[in-house]
Amino acid sequence: MKNQKLAIRVRLNLQKGKDNKFPIYIRFYVDGVKAEISTRHFILQSHWDSKNDRVKALCAEAAFINGYVERTTNFINQEFLKAHSLGKETSALEIKNKLQGKESTPQHKTILQAFDYHNLKMAETVKVGKVVPKTLTRYHITRNKVANFIKLQFKAADKPLPEMRLSFVTEFEHYLLTVEKIQSNTAHKYIKNLKKIMNMAVGLDWIPSNPFTQFKCSYTSPDREILNQDELNLIMNKKMHTARLEEVRDVFIFCCYTGFAYADVYQFEKDAVMKGLDGNLWLSTNRQKTGTKESVPLLPIPLEILSKYQDHEYCLKYNKLLPVNSNQRYNSYLKEIADLCGIKKKLTSHIARHTFATTVTLANGVPIETVSAMLGHSNIRTTQIYAKVVEQKVSDDMLKLKSILQSKTTQKEMKKVSGC
């Protein structure tokens, strides 16, 4: 603690006279920072002793006013010395508030300030490559949604952290589902981010505990749209009438047989393909979404596609592995391809990754642990979502087999009856 300094001066304020009388003010400084109070006592200028900063004895109220000034300056001194003896720093304003009976209210951190602090720290980790930029973006989006919710729900710009209650997060969930019309899984991702901010605030001693701990975020497995092998073959073999559709079709098929997301394929440069320890060609990247490593050995179909575009004008000009359009244009062209092929399913950049996980790998006996590693999943439970889809496919296939076997049995019985 630094050695603070206090200075006190009692003065007659000649700028605020009334009926030829002037008020007495007590001004004091802590480390050069000023505070001032009025004693509310008025005297003639001739009754003021400027050398001793007191009222002259010839004034009838001299003893009373001087006593008040003495008690007040003593109080200022005592508060200053009390803070010093406790090893705390004080300020002129803090002493003035105590003198006037105003207990200084501690300034609590707010929820948006907590977000800003967290996001600032995360931005620094993004710069050194410890966190992917998309993760930071999600926290910025969460902050904006919390700010919009506070404005709508509380008609305020922010909320102090100590005022947070469990009802805040339950109402926030309701807001996301009904006002922003966000799906439950996505809403709970934002709430997980909010809970993390509150846990950080606890760790920084801004609040004693996290009131949102009791709110449990759930996850509902969505229906994953996938292509079966027949649909995949149909798209691969379909003659496209324009170069742009052919390029989009080839990029989509490439994703179906590698499992890479659109954002990752968009980033691949020409030197991305490497020879692995097994002597085969591999493609690997740190996923744009999570930053986890995703490595896939290239099958004959994606290798054929890469060979097809190695001298493509776009790829040569921008040093890219494949001619990948903007995401909006890419998905628009996929819809056109689906119509041309007569496929009723909604083709998107995501369906290719889902198809790789199911139709191309799991359905052909690739162990789920291997698929999880190739997809860059940090938790195998994420991959198990696809396994459920495969179970449905197995069930459908077994029903077909059951039908075939029953047909053969019926034919045998008919032959016996006919004596053949």
Image: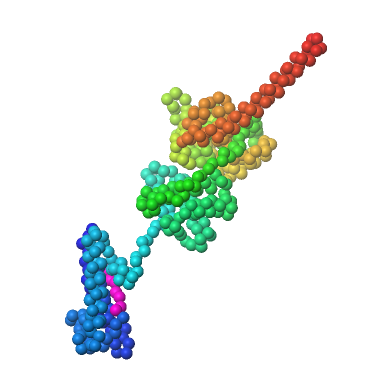
The image quadrant that residue 37 belongs to is bottom left
**Quadrant showing the C terminus:** top right
**Which residue sits at x=32%, y=87%?**
18
Please name whichever residue, 27 or 305, is drawn nearer the observer in this view of the structure: 27
* Residue 12 seen in this snapshot: yes
Q: Residue at x 61, y 35 (%)?
A: 226
Residue drawn at x 60%, y 38% as measured from the top left: 223
Residue 191 screen position, x and y as percent? 49, 48
Task: Specify the farthest residue to the bottom.
Answer: 19
Residue 90 percent location from the top left of the image: 27, 64
Question: Observer-nearest residue: 73 or 319?
Answer: 73
Where does the image place residue 197, in percent across and percent down from the top left?
43, 50
Name the residue at 28% across, 66% down. Answer: 91
Which residue is farthest right? Answer: 418
Residue 139's spot in the image, x, y percent? Answer: 46, 49
- What colouring style does the render use? rainbow
| Span of residues in magenta | 31-39
Inspect the magenta stretch and tell me whether residue 32 lies in it: yes
In magenta stretch: residue 115: no
Residue 15 in sight: no
Among the 4 quarters of the image, the one containing residue 66: bottom left
